[in-house]
């Protein structure tokens, strides 16, 4: 029971960061490259284009 009490908040935070990554990225004030990494952005260049179009 103690493990659930200690681990559950981290699991819940991870779930919402996985479900709503753009909202959390903006909330933490990170760039697309900082949030996703260069290797992921090479596979998904549309994320860079979408981010540059918002500002």
Image (tube, grey):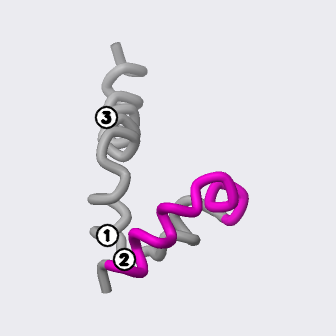
Q: Which label's residue is closer to the chain start, 3 or 2?
A: 3
What residue do we see at 30% from left, 79% from top? 54
Compared with 25, 13 (above or below) is above
Q: Which label's residue is closer to the chain start, 3 or 1?
A: 3
Give the x, y percent position of residue 30.
Answer: 44, 74
Indicate the secondary structure of the residue bearing disc 2.
loop
- Residue count near mark 2 (Cα–Cα under 10 Å), binned few <14, some 14–19, many ≥20: few
Which of the two marks, 3 or 2, is nearer to us in this view? 2
Q: CA distance from mark 2 to mark 1?
A: 5 Å
Which of the two marks, 3 or 1, is nearer to us in this view? 1
Compared with 48, 11 (above or below) is above
Indicate the secondary structure of the residue bearing disc 3.
helix
What residue do we see at 69% from left, 60% from top? 42
Q: Residue furthest top?
A: 1
What residue do we see at 27% from left, 59% from top? 23
Give me the disc on residue 47. none
- The answer to which of 40 and 30 lies nearer the viewer is 40
Q: Is 42 in the magenta? A: yes
Give the x, y percent position of residue 36.
Answer: 56, 59
Residue under label 3, please give it: 12
What residue do we see at 35% from left, 35% from top? 15
Give the x, y percent position of residue 41.
Answer: 62, 61
**The quarter of the displayed image where residue 4 is located:** top left
Task: Give the extent of the magenta segment.
Answer: 38-53
Magenta stretch: dominant secondary structure: helix
Q: CA distance from mark 3 to mark 2?
A: 21 Å
């Amino acid at each position: 029971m103690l493990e659930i009490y200690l681990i559950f908040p981290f699991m819940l935070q991870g779930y919402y960061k996985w479900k709503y990554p753009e909202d959390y990225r903006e909330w933490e004030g990170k760039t697309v490259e900082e949030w996703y990494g260069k290797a992921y952005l090479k596979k998904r260049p549309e994320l860079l284009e979408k981010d540059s179009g918002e500002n």
